[in-house]
Structures are given as structure tokens and as C-alpha cells.
Image: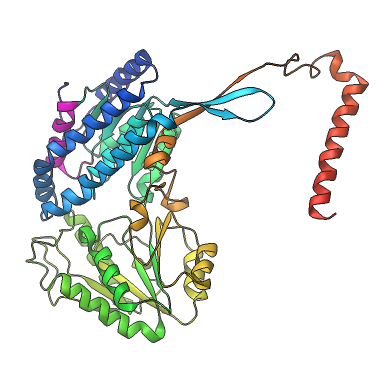
Amino acid sequence: MSAVTQPFGPAHIGREELDRLVTLQRAAFRAEGDPSADVRRDRIDRLLLAVLDAADELAEGLAEDYGRRPATLTKASEFLGLTEEARCLRDGLGEWMKPTPVDGPASAFVQHKPLGVVGVVTAWNFPVALAVHPALDALAAGNRVIMKFTDVHVRTGEIFARAVARYLREDEVAVVCGDVRTAQEFSDLPLDKIIFTGSPAVGRLVATAAGANLVPVTLELGGKNPVVVAPDADLEMAAHRIAASRMLNGGQVCLCPDYVFVPRRHAEEFTAALQAELARLFPTYTDSPAAVSMVNERNFDRVLGLIRDAVAKGARKITAVAEEPCRESLLIPPTLLLDVPEQAQIEQEEIFGPVLPIHVYDDIAEPISYIAGRPAPLAAYWYGKDGDDFRRFLQHTTSGGLTRNDCLLHHSVDGPFGGVGNSGTGAYSGKAGFDEFTHRRVVAAQTGPRGFTDGLVGAPLLAPAMTFGVDQAISAAAADIRARIGL
């Protein structure tokens, strides 16, 4: 197996080394041709095993990099989900690789071709899972992969790079660590595809850099994920699940609920239930071994700033635990915000912390209009029955995915995961991931007596029969449309 790319961590990795990896992988890809299903499965297995064998070391590294993060959370959220994704890919890729027949006058089929060299730019909140999950999909599609690991988690990046290098050659899968400038140069590489997970602001920069080389980009971003608690919702169940979902990974999840709409007549009861659930989860917070730190001081200060700005503009703050934020451990106690004014910064910015604004409504049209009038989020949540109100919500709002009577659940099903508009472009996971990293090439064969351009070039184009035939075809198509629409 290859040595790990050096140096990694916060040090800068120069463009020369990045270009070397791209050239190496592209040469290996061209020499191999489209890899067989067995080769793809073998690479999937080796990448997954690299992570599983290093699970303890990776969990320890992330706990150190975060400051406080339970090992069980890391193992459950970063590693276990990858095993199911790998199983789905192994089982399905043989069928997905088969040529697809195409209906039409010609003999044709669609060939499913790997793109080549795929770049994966991972995020810091779940750095291993968000690197490996799309990498598994790209390998299933037959590609080579270069992963740019986040610069935020230095120890974890070193461990991850070593683990991958033990099981895969760098011309199959390579890990690049490095600083922010390395990430910027990575986005400018002449890759065949880039998938980026992170904020919309950085996603725009990645897309702009990749666009200079006409490199297609899949963007997995975020947004302000809304929750609507319907009038017929089970308030206790909603409070229980929303509280836990908001606090997952200290609230640092792109799928976390970002604000809640609750009927005015239920607001007091729901807020009390939510406060009680948070207190049950964390009787104490700043000394709780189950709490997850803000990832760094910058995010700690940013989230505190959002709370203070909202309160200064008239919001009411409720803390479920009677403690103050702790800078030493970078922990902010779970916080609810009521009566948040529209001009508050927290109404515009994704929170990414243990804070949840609560809005009230009198008519279900109010939250639907509010959500529909803002950039489409990565997720939307509805608590209540599958009735007319829910169907109205489905029809009039847009989001990357949606879960009813829970949060995050749609990410776990065997279907595409991705955003829309401000929350991203493209999707991956399972068959959708295979398709995202595949080029579908149409292959056609002429079996009839005439060539495709016969009659369209030279003197035959001017023949009266040709002119009459084309005009007749246009008239017949227009008449058919008029008949369908009643004109």
C-alpha cells in the first residue's frame, strides 16, 4: 500500500502534489478501463474496512479535535451508516452497471460509464462519514477518488489518511489533508467531478473554481430547516423528537431542525414540553460527558452572537439548564428563543448549534407561506397526521428531503440524499450515488437502409416531396396538440 500524502494537517500541500495525484489516478483509470463489478466491490470493502479497523483511534481523535465528543456518538454516526451504504452498493451495482435498452427507431442502449477521477471535499461536523459515504458511491460507479479532508480536525485527518493508505493504493483512493489554501487549490483541479459538503457561501466558491475547468459539481449544503407542528400533532412526541434532533452532535448537523412553527394555542404547552425534554437529556450540560463541544472557538462565538443579537432585538431566551456558556469547554447550554423578530440575524443564518427559535401561528397557511418564501432548505419536518394540511405542505413547499413525525429519518432510507437551490445541487446515496458519479452514454447502431441525414443535405433537401413531407408532419403535430387542449 502507498504512503500517506505528506505533509498533512494544517500545513499547506502545494499544487504540484495535488496535480501529481490527479495525473497518477487518471493514468491508472485509463489503463484499467471500466472496472468490473468484482473490482468495485473489492475497493468498497477495503475502504470500509480501513475505517472500521481504525474506529477506536478515529473516535479518540475526533474527541480530541472537538474538545468533547462521545466515542459512541462518533462510532454510531460516522461508521455504522457506512456499512449499510456499502451493502446497498455491493448488492446493487452489478444490476446498475448493465446497459439499458433504449426505445426508438434505432438499435440503441445506454452504457453506464465511470467519470474518471472524483474529488470529495468533506465537512468538519461528520468528517469521516461525509468523506467516505460519497467516496463509496464513486467507487461503486467505477471511479478513482481523492478526498480532501477538513483542515479543522488535524489529529483525525492524520489518522484517517494513514488508515486509508493501509488498505488502498493512492492511485485508487488518496487522502489529502492540508490547510484552507490547499482546499481552495483542490477545487481548481481538473477533476472529472467534485462533491462538496459545507456551507452555501463556501459552496459558491467551490462551484466558481470548478467552473473554470468545466468540472461538474455536486453541492451538499444546508439551510434553515423548518419544523411545522400541526394542530393535530402529538405535542409530547414532537417535543421529545425535536429536542433530541436539535441536540444531535451539539446541534452541528446540516439536517438539524432550525426553527419550529407551533399553533398559538399550543405554544405554552409545547415550549414547556420541549424545555422538559432538554432538561431530561441534559440535567447538567457543561460537565456532561454526553455533551458535544462547539467545534472551535469561532463557531462558539458565532452561535453566542446569534443568541445575543436575537435577545437584543426583543427575543425571549429560555435555557433548559441553568448554566452559563463555558468557553473553556466550548459548550453552550440548550437554548430556546421565543418572539424572535424577523430582523434578527438568527432568522437568516443557519444556526449549527444548540439553539432553537419557536414561532407561533394561527392558520396553517402562515408557516407554509413563510417557508415557501425563503430559500429551499436541506430538510423540512412536519409533525401531525397525513391529512389535507400535510398534503398542502407537500405541494407548496420545497426542500431537499422531508420527514413526517420525526427528524433526519429521510436520510436513512434507500433513496437520494441532496439539496435543492440554496441547499445544494445533485444527490447521492445508493442508486442515486451510483448515478451521480456515472456518465450515461447512448450507443446507437443504424440497422435500416437509410442514413440519418439522408434527405437533409444537398439537392434531396429541396425536392418537393421532402418539403411537403416536413410541412405535413408539422401540421399533424400541431393538430394533435390542439385536440388535446381543446382548441
Nearer the observer, 172 or 405 = 405
Q: Residue 192 in the image: x percent, y percent?
A: 41, 28
In the rendered image, the quadrant that contains the C terminus is bottom right
Identify the residue shown where x is 31% and y is 84%: 269
97 displayed left or right of 62: right
Identify the residue shown where x is 31% and y is 60%: 256
Nearer the observer, 186 or 389 = 389
Colouring scheme applied when the structure was drawn: rainbow
On whether residue 48 falls in the magenta region, the answer is no
Residues in magenta? 150-167
364 displayed left or right of 198: right
Residue 3, quarter of the rendered image: top left
- Whether residue 234 is visible here, answered yes or no, is yes
In the rendered image, the quadrant that contains the N terminus is top left
Q: Is residue 274 above or below residue 156?
A: below
On whether residue 157 falls in the magenta region, the answer is yes
Q: Is residue 17 above or below residue 49?
A: above
